[in-house]
Amino acid sequence: MARVQLEHITKRYDDVTAVDDVSMEIEDGEFVTFVGPSGCGKSTTMETVAGLTQPTEGQVYIGDDDVTNLAPKDRGVAMVFQNIALFPHMDVFENISFGLRLRTYDDEEVHRRVEQAADIVQLEGMLDRMPDELSGGQRQRVAIARAIVRNPDVFLMDEPLANLDAKLRVHMRTELQRLHRELETTIIYVTHDQAEAMTMSDRIAVLNEGRLQQLAPPLTCYNEPANRFVAGFIGSPSMNFIEGELVDGSLETANFTVELDAARLPKVAVGDAVTLGIRPEDVHLTAYADSLAAPTEPIDAKTDVLEPMGDEVFVYLLLAEGAAGSMEEDPATSPNQLLMSVTPDTEIEADQDINVVLDRSKIHLFDAATGEALVHGITGLEGPESGTAPTEAE
Amino acid sequence: MADPTDSTDPTTADSSDTNSNDGSDGQPRDPTLRRPDGGAVVENDRDAELDRGPFQQWVSDSISHPERVYRAMFYVAAIFFLFTTLFPFYWLLMVALTPEGQLQDIVFTPNGFNPGAFVEVFQVIPFHIYMFNSFVIALASTIVVLVIASLAGYAFGRLEFPGRTPLMLLVLVISFFPPAAFFIPLNDLFNTSFAILRPITGDGTLYNTPFALVTPLSAIFMPLAIFILTTFYSQIPDGLEDAARVEGTTRLGALFRVIIPLSAPGVATAGVLTFIAVYNEFFFSFLMTDGQPENWAPILDGILAYQGQYQVLYNLMAAASILGVIPVAILVVIAQEKIVSGLTAGALKE
């Protein structure tokens, strides 16, 4: 049980900066997930907490102690590795008790604690098996038991579910949440799977290119992303981004215009380039727009491809006249394409001319130059100051 | 195997008969039709079987099934190696069993039967002490080599540090030095009296102590062990070492608790090779002691001790040689089991 604090952690290799000035504070008992694309520095950041990597600059605190220069064994952390890393020459009991046997516990205590840990992860009766006789999920549970048996202050998990099959992964996800509730230990969890991050964490730390992008509860990251990267990374399918320019009284993009008073936006002025972000589920057919409090003007579009997912249908829309879906263009960032998500009972087919509206309360604006979020929801920002409080910007 | 009498060979006649009888090709083949190399022209495989002698037949079969040749070559090579390695042992046994003075013209059987030679070796000289000396020296060298080479192998195999490759090359280069080049300076050094060594060796020199053998022999056989262990240790996944370190070991602890046990086949190989090499070593073993059993003289000196000024007890030398091989043979049998049962990294998903 301990607070973890990172202060200006930087890790440089010869010519690469893996982690760049990351600072964060993780509360006692919190479940924090480091998420980001491959090579974003999330594993390296965790390794600096574990002590397996020495940061080039910065300090790591666990509890009230500066552990930056302590060996991993003296930090009170336990870790579950992506490749599970059970010792193949030891049976399950020896694997779980490895850490205990290195310390001064008597045999009885070791047995008691191993059995208790095995009980928690439901491994009773398997203590004398060798790792190669276990299934993937069982090995994973042994690795978790090995970590919890020592009552660590901080529990580190480096993509522990990455090597499991999809079904088992979903199952282990709930098991881990249950485990966290039971142990009430601080857990730092690394994953590149945003579904894992969203479902399990108290807070998500989104990292990209070694920098911390946002540290916030999952729904905050989803609804109020701090910048364009977080907006695009969290949520599946990704948010639509459309480049535009602020003109007097509106935001003009290549194919449509959104009424907007630039004077009421922070940090930008008329003439600046901004990026409009809208999630697929916030794009609606005009026919269904009545329920929206603040729809935009209808936008002409043509359906391109439909992807029925069962519970929803993804519709790829072409905005420009004569625009064609192109393999080279990422629909999420193309100015001429828009991804819409509709309910499966919507009557819609491919190559159909339709009108869509965007939900103004769900439009995100980002500074095109820095990618930073300007405002989340532009309800009431279409005219000059009228007394309606603008939605708070992050 | 072109046999000029082929055309009159009854098998050839048979072949023509068969051909004409089944009438498949209408015309009986001209039995005098010969190929330039002397072999008979044949129309099909059946003719070939009938036309050729067993060796020719085997050759033609082998051309279409080359694996037969490889198997034959394997047997030839295996028998050759078995013969060249085992026959000297057989010969040694014959010499050992032949009573003294009857060694003339023994061919494949001993002249008489005298197993008592295996007891006599211990009565004539204290051969067991020589064996003990050799065993201790080989064991000590093996332990020294394994410990130091393990640390070196860990550094070379698992750590990134500047100058790793040049250092590795240096180790390689040193292993190419002829050991004889070290002998004169070492012998001089080991015969120098050091005050600090007086409590240990009496006169302060290392000559006539096991150290005079263990130190140079360990150094000479170290590079090979370093190379073997570097290869093995570098293949142990980083995750296992990280796991051990997070669980509470130091790097050194992880080496001894996880990496070495998982590299057991490599450690066994390096250990066995070192043990055998030191046990069999001649040059330093012969020169670094004065040949007296109480002065840590190894087996080599023991065997040579049966050679007196007026008499050479060949049968006892042979018996002693056989006895000397036994510890190594036992070691190899045990270690082989260890190597074969080598642990696999089954628990790790990579």
Image (cartoon, grey):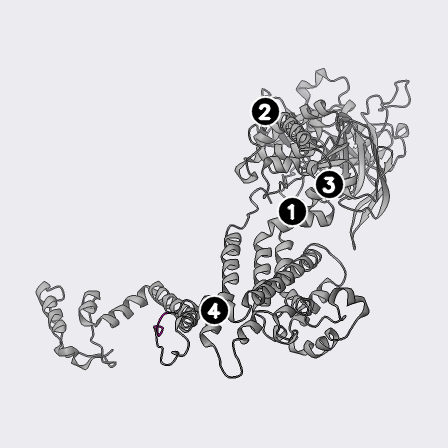
Residue highlighted by disc 3 = B248
Front residue (pair A42, A387) = A42
Residue highlighted by disc 4 = B120
- At 56% across and 54% down in the image, what residue appears? B265
Q: CA distance from mark 2 to mark 1?
A: 61 Å
> Tag 3, which chain?
B
Which element carries disc 1, helix, strand or loop? helix
Q: Which one is earlier in the sequence, the residue at label 4 or at label 3?
A: 4
Most extreme residue toward the front, as rendered?
Answer: B123
Visible residue check, residue A131: yes
- At 61% across and 65% down in the image, what residue appears? B133
Q: Amino acid at mark 3?
A: Gly
Quadrant of the image containing the N terminus of chain A: top right
Residue highlighted by disc 1 = B258
Residues tagged 2 and 4 counted as in contact (Cβ below 8 A): no
Q: Residues within 10 Å of mark 3 (few under 14, many from 20)?
A: many
Residue highlighted by disc 2 = A348
Tell me the magenta residue range.
B109-113
Q: Amino acid at mark 2?
A: Ile
Q: Is disc 4 in the same subunit as disc 3?
A: yes
Quadrant of the image containing the C terminus of chain A: top right
Front residue (pair A100, B94) = B94
Q: Which one is earlier in the sequence, the residue at label 4 or at label 1?
A: 4
Q: Residues within 10 Å of mark 2 (few under 14, many from 20)?
A: some
Q: Amino acid at mark 4?
A: Glu
